[in-house]
Image (spheres, rainbow, N blue to C red):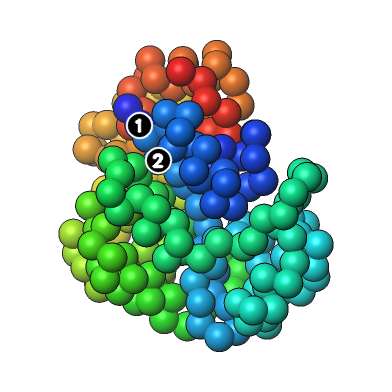
Amino acid sequence: MKNLAHRGYSVKYPENTMEAFIKAYEKGFDGVETDVHLTKDGVLVLIHDEKINRTSTGKGYVKDLTIQELRQYNYCYKSYGHYDIPTLEELLRFIQDKDFIVNIELKTDVIHYQDIEEKVYQLVKRLKVEDKVYYSSFYLPSLLKMREIDPHVYVGYLMEFHYKKKYQELIEHDLKAFHPRYNFLTQEHIKTLKNQNIFIATWTVPNLKEYQRLIDLGVDIIISNEYFK
């Protein structure tokens, strides 16, 4: 079982910042989960929301701002100090010489950034970290596109609602990894998924009790804000 830090070590440091990613590595997480968007000038940046309003001192959509414009603001999110918005390249360069996983969520379920799947894949390939990167998304076409680009990549189908519908799509498209929110995972669900040889990753696990329950049920990846080991 692997333990990934949700948006980095986000219970201690501002989410989706290099500080949060570095501290997750130092704490002992097996990797991090993060979210990728595309700037106006085509740079892959790591931030959860489509807008920068919640986590920074600025306002506006990522898609409408250049990397230079985005870096005029502080992504401190209720913390002290100054934090730049990180690029995907910066994070991938950090992990190049480390035994550390990055789960990249393609944030295409609200805004579909043109060719973002290809851009992400080519960057991962150029930096030679293919074996350290997993891809996930709520948007099924992005996962199918990633698999079309490279049939061997890990693609995980995220879900927060409509378990039955998502599970049916998972089976219909022969996806091998499912990423449901932790509270949807019952013993019966996990048994069914394991019988189908589906890899199970679950996210925002809130406490040690739930963490232990999911380990006992046999999930493969737990994504959490806190370090529970």
Q: Secondary structure at mark 2?
A: strand
Q: Which image quadrant is residue 57 in?
A: bottom right
Mark 2 vs 1, N-terminal side: 1
Residue that mark 2 sits on: 31
Q: Secondary structure at mark 1?
A: strand
Mark 1, Cα crowd under 10 Å, few <14 / some 14-19 / many 20+, is: some
**Residue 32 placed where, x, y %?**
45, 44
The reply to whether dot 2 and dot 1 touch (C-beta < 8 Å) is: yes
The CA span between labels 2 and 1 is 8 Å
**Residue 115 placed where, x, y %?**
41, 81
Q: Which image quadrant is residue 199 in?
A: top left
Residue 124 left/right relative to 35 = left
Q: Residue at x 64, y 61 (%)?
A: 84
The answer to whether one can see residue 220 in this image is yes
**Residue 76 placed where, x, y %?**
73, 51
Q: Which image quadrant is residue 50 in?
A: bottom right
Mark 2, Cα crowd under 10 Å, few <14 / some 14-19 / many 20+, is: many
Give, as a three-letter code, the residue at label 1: Lys
Residue 176 left/right relative to 170 = left
Q: Residue at x 28, y 49 (%)?
A: 97
Give, as a three-letter code, the residue at label 2: Gly
Q: Residue at x 78, y 45 (%)?
A: 80
**Residue 101 placed where, x, y %?**
35, 45
Q: Of the residues tagged 2 and 1, which is closer to the observer?
A: 2
Q: Which mark is residue 2?
A: 1
**Which residue extends farthest front?**
81
